[in-house]
Every structure is written in structure tokens, then in C-alpha cells.
Image: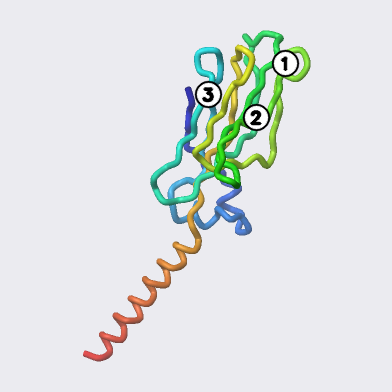
């Protein structure tokens, strides 16, 4: 099971140096809270590609064991297409209640489709982070140029009549 909540980060909107500031001011929110639970009944969670022709990223922030998790080794792996186009699960966390019940990650950005897998352990293991939608600046700028060229063309036609 997974959840997705729309969240606007006001700091991103106020920061002109942010790559998302333009998207946030002109488009729908681009940051959404994301998470899933892995356990014996649900050993994997898939974050699918959206068919909206925008770039999407999954930023994984934390992996933690639930209160009911036993003191056994829990290994979480991620299965995402690598640079060669292969799909191979890569372990990203090995947690044990008595030793390391939670990890915080920084900089783990994954491009959907991505699958998170509980390779061993009964769980529950909770994964959380953000689902980011990026506007393609090149397409956006090209579209703006087309619109401005149409405006110039309309002005020329108005002046000719």
C-alpha cells in the first residue's frame, strides 16, 4: 500500500534560485509526500511512470521499521532501470530493531518506474519521501517562443490592414 498527498513547500515558492520556483508559481504543486509500507503480505511497492510527458523523480528520504517489527534483519532493495537499461535489485538499507531501526537518506533520486522490495525480514518497514514533478524547461521555453512569435505576427497583420 502507498499514499500520496499534495504538499506545497512555501520555501521553494519564495526562493528565486530554486529550479522549481517557476513551476510552482505557474503550474500545479510539483512536490507530493510519498510513502509505502512493506511487510510479509506486501513485499514490494511500485511507483509507476505518469503518462503526462513531464519528468518525475522519487526522492527517498527515510526508511524505518515499524513498532511491530521483530529483531531480525530487514533488507530493502530498489529495482530501477540502470544506465544500461537493466533491472537489478540493489540493496539500499539493512535494518534491525536493536541496532539500526531507521535511516535518513539524502540525495537518493530515482526515476519512475521504480520498485522497492523487502528482500528479507517480516516488517513492517516504512519508506517515505517526495514525488517531484519537473516541468521540461526546453519545451516550456519553446512553447513561450511560439506564443510570442504568434503575437508578433498578429501585430504585423494588424498594422498591415
Secondary structure under the numbered disc 2 in the rendered image: strand
Q: Earlier in the sequence, mark 2 or mark 1?
A: 2
**How many neighbours does mark 2 have within 10 angstroms: few (below 14), some (14-19), or many (20 or more)?**
some
Label 3 and label 1: CA atoms lie apart by 19 Å
Q: Pick whichever, 38 or 75, lies toward us.
A: 75
Q: Pick whichever, 65 or 41, lies toward us.
A: 41
Tell which tag, 2 or 1, sits nearer the viewer: 1
Q: Earlier in the sequence, mark 3 or mark 1?
A: 3
Q: Earlier in the sequence, mark 3 or mark 2?
A: 3
The residue that appears at 70% across and 31% down in the rendered structure is 104
How far across and how far down the image is residue 18, in percent?
Answer: 61, 55
Tell which tag, 3 or 2, sits nearer the viewer: 3
Residue bearing the label numbered 2:
62
Q: Are marks 2 and 1 in contact (CB under 8 Å)?
A: no
How far across and how far down the image is residue 12, in percent?
Answer: 59, 49
Label 2 and label 1: CA atoms lie apart by 15 Å
How far across and how far down the image is residue 100, in percent?
Answer: 75, 20
Amino acid at each position: 500500500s502507498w499514499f500520496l498527498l499534495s504538499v506545497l513547500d512555501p520555501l521553494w515558492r519564495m526562493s528565486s534560485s530554486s529550479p522549481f520556483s517557476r513551476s510552482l508559481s505557474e503550474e500545479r504543486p510539483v512536490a507530493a509526500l510519498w510513502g509505502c509500507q512493506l511487510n510479509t503480505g506486501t513485499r514490494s511497492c511500485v511507483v509507476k511512470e505518469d503518462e503526462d510527458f513531464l519528468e518525475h523523480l522519487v526522492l527517498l528520504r527515510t526508511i524505518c521499521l515499524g513498532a511491530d517489527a521483530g529483531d531480525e534483519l530487514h533488507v530493502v532493495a530498489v529495482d530501477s532501470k540502470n544506465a544500461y537499461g537493466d533491472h537489478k535489485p540493489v540493496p539500499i538499507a539493512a535494518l534491525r530493531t536493536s541496532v539500526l531501526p531507521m535511516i535518513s537518506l539524502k540525495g537518493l533520486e530515482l526515476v519512475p518506474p521504480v520498485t522497492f522490495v523487502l528482500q528479507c525480514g517480516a516488517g513492517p518497514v516504512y519508506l517515505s519521501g517526495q514525488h517531484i514533478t519537473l516541468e521540461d524547461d526546453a519545451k516550456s521555453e519553446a512553447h513561450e517562443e511560439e506564443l510570442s512569435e504568434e503575437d508578433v505576427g498578429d501585430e504585423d497583420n494588424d498594422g498591415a490592414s
